[in-house]
């Protein structure tokens, strides 16, 4: 059971994307610090009097569920186009094409077909992972391919289930960190300039989950003063040494056998993780254990209390905000120290299905699978809905995370890209 007397205040841990861009940009999965939080402040996200103005809508970005990177006025994403699975660059001003580069000869075949990866963008390169397991480096200026490697052919990589590789790569200085899911290459570090292997991590076994990569993406932790890469794979949450890829600690209780999706939340010497499919959530305390590290379970919340299927979680101070429930995005505020649901948890909200969550200023944007976009105050005081609207185009399952840059709200809906004015 959670200990209600357990209390702490976390510092913010910045994540680095190599040779990058300004704080106002959104250069990778879940933003500048890979935590789902935007640095935008001059925005109006109160939609109680109506939806924001649609500035433009365009097509041609391809089929898929990938979110967006936005850097220096250019949008980057991935999608299945007529030429194969492609990386797409569009102008943020009007959605017009900058370049499109196919990274596969044809669209990969797997469950729920389409691209999944949010590109990672540096000063002069774009890095992506195709849903077939191709990890590719492209020139940012013209989309030319610099190098490409294959998870499956080179590292015997595999997913824990049938929906294709879904990772967004981490750029850390001169390295790219990604997760093939192979027995001898669960996670790999590559030279981001050449694609050469720096190290590969061995996999681990356990009674929970399945072998292979999960649907999560790697984040950086400095727990106990040790730089490490943390992600959620088939067998559970794993941490490996940034120096050599050796496994530092694992935690399996939160894993399921279908899909482990949500990116873990890193907080000093703590990690919060959650999984759907009737599993639950856990707070872990990372401590020294002889010459190594150990993950200690502070508490475990069963699926009836909190399970984030997919769509992610956002931490603000001592609280986590997310959608709760398998295939549900019921708005929820959780007190991290105690595991107490402060508000929500069983509240349906204005849309249906899981919710992709992005924080902008002091608002949370919940984009429901059914398409509705809700603005919710990021406060533990109470659930406060600040308006909602249905975007101009919706089809299938709206899983792509919303992105706000330079007073503009960007929404990807399969082959369609939309831009709304949310500037004050």
Image (cartoon, rainbow, N blue to C red):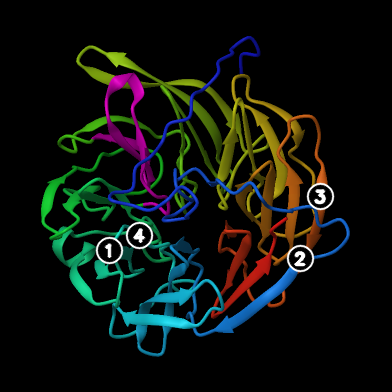
Q: Residue at x 62, y 74 (%)?
A: 418
Determine contact: label 1, label 4, CB under 8 Å.
no
Mark sitting earlier along the chain (2/1): 2
| Secondary structure category for the residue under label 2 | loop
Disc ID at residue 386: 3
Nearest the eye: 242 or 112: 242
Q: Residue at x 32, y 80 (%)?
A: 101
In the image, farthest residue toward the bottom = 82
Determine contact: label 4, label 3, CB under 8 Å.
no
How dense is the environment of label 4, judged by Cα within 10 Å: few (below 14), some, or many (20 and up)? many
Task: Answer whether residue 227 is magenta in the image.
Answer: yes
How dense is the environment of label 1, judged by Cα within 10 Å: few (below 14), some, or many (20 and up)? few
**Circle 4 sits on which residue?**
121
Image coordinates of residue 376 in percent, x first then y, are: 75, 46
**Circle 1 sits on which residue?**
124
Nearest the eye: 374 or 235: 374
How dense is the environment of label 3, judged by Cα within 10 Å: few (below 14), some, or many (20 and up)? some
Look at the image and give the residue range highlighted in magenta. 214-241
Looking at the image, is mark 3 or mark 1 nearer the viewer?
1
Mark sitting earlier along the chain (3/2): 2
Determine whether 333 is above or below 216 in the image. above
Looking at the image, is mark 1 or mark 4 nearer the viewer?
1
Viewed as shown, does residue 370 lie left or right of 105?
right
Determine whether 103 is above or below 370 in the image. below
| Secondary structure category for the residue under label 4 | strand
Q: Is residue 394 visible?
A: no
Mark sitting earlier along the chain (4/3): 4
Gap between marks 2 and 1 measured at Cα:
33 Å
Image coordinates of residue 337 in percent, x first then y, are: 59, 20
**Circle 2 sits on which residue?**
52
């Amino acid at each position: 059971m959670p200990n209600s007397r357990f209390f702490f205040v976390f510092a913010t841990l910045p994540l680095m994307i190599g040779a990058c861009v300004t704080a106002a940009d959104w250069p990778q999965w879940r933003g500048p610090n890979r935590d789902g939080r935007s640095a935008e402040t001059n925005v109006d996200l109160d939609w109680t009097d109506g939806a924001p103005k649609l500035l433009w809508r365009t097509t041609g970005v391809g089929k898929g569920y990938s979110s967006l990177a936005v850097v220096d006025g250019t949008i980057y994403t991935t999608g299945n186009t007529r030429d194969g699975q492609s990386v797409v660059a569009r102008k943020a001003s009007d959605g017009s094409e900058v370049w499109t580069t196919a990274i596969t000869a044809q669209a990969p075949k797997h469950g729920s077909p389409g691209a999944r990866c949010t590109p990672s963008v540096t000063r002069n390169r774009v890095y992506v992972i195709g849903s077939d397991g191709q990890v590719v480096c492209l020139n940012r200026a013209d989309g030319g391919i610099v190098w490409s490697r294959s998870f499956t052919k080179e590292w015997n990589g595999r997913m824990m289930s049938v929906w294709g590789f879904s990772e967004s790569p981490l750029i850390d200085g001169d390295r790219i960190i990604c997760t093939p899911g192979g027995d001898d290459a669960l996670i790999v570090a590559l030279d981001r300039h050449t694609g050469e292997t720096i190290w590969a991590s061995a996999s681990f076994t356990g009674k929970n989950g399945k072998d292979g990569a999960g649907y999560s993406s790697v984040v950086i932790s400095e727990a106990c003063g040790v730089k490490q890469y943390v992600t959620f794979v088939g067998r559970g949450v794993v941490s490996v040494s940034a120096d050599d890829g050796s496994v530092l600690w694992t935690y399996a209780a939160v894993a399921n056998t279908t899909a482990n999706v949500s990116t873990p939340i890193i907080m000093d010497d703590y990690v919060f993780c959650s999984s759907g499919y009737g599993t639950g959530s856990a707070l872990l305390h990372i401590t020294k254990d002889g010459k190594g590290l150990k993950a200690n379970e502070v508490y475990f919340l069963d699926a009836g209390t909190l399970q984030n299927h997919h769509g992610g979680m956002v931490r603000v101070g001592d609280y986590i905000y997310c959608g709760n429930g398998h295939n549900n995005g019921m708005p929820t505020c959780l007190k991290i120290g105690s595991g107490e649901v402060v508000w929500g948890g069983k509240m349906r909200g204005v849309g249906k299905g899981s919710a992709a969550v992005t924080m902008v200023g002091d608002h949370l944007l919940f984009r429901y699978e059914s398409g509705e976009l809700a603005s919710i105050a990021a406060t533990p005081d109470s659930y406060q809905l600040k308006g909602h609207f249905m975007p101009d185009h919706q089809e299938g399952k709206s899983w792509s995370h919303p992105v706000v840059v330079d007073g503009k709200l960007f929404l990807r809906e399969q082959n369609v890209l939309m831009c709304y004015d949310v500037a004050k």
